[in-house]
Image (cartoon, rainbow, N blue to C red):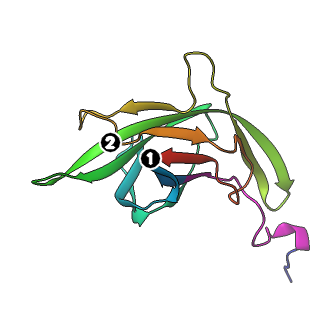
Amino acid sequence: MVSCEKDDICAEGTATTPSLVVEFYDKSDEATLTNVNGLKYFVEGMTDTISPGSVSSIRVPLRVDATSTKWGFVYYRPNTSLVTPNTDFLEFKYIPRTEYVSRACGYKTLFTLDLPAAGAPNPVLTNGTDATSLWIDHVDVITPNIENEDDVHIKIYF
């Protein structure tokens, strides 16, 4: 007869590698959580996109095998004649830290966002090639230590 020991099964609810939690706010009323209609996002260089639709917050995974991850955020800004996509890129720079969870669960990776330096903000905001202006107005880092998904880490104002 074969059976599992208690520590051979990773219990549901055990903390794993957290994603970066992002919330969106209206730049003219920075206290108002605001939906981004038709949002899509993707890792630079990849063809797969995540399309959550109309949302005010998202979870964005960071690469555990690197010290930065660059995400493209696509917003379909309404125009007078048609709806056109506008892609802005945010590159997150961080220090990954691997932590042992248990024999059954293995390891998880926690992240600490690098502090902005003179002339080197973090995250770095750049414009895509599909529009002439940024749709993201500015970004605030709220919690630089990414250790769980209960806290908001980044606020994007648009």
Query: On the rendered structure, is 153 left or right of 55?
Result: right
| Residue 54 occupies quadrant | bottom left
- Residue tagged 1: 27
The mark lying in front, picked from 2 and 1, is 1
Q: In whole angstroms, how far apart are the C-alphas of marks 2 and 1?
A: 18 Å
The secondary structure that most of the magenta stretch takes on is loop
Q: Secondary structure at mark 2?
A: strand
The reply, left or right, for residue 11 in relation to residue 59 is: right
Q: Residue 141 or 26: which is nearer the viewer?
A: 26
Quadrant containing the N terminus is bottom right
> Which residue is depicted at the point 85% across and 79% down?
3
The residue that mark 2 highlights is 87
Q: How many marks?
A: 2
Crowding at mark 1 (Cα within 10 Å: few <14, some 14-19, many 20+): some
Q: Secondary structure at mark 1?
A: loop
Locate residue 119, reporting x and y percent: 55, 16
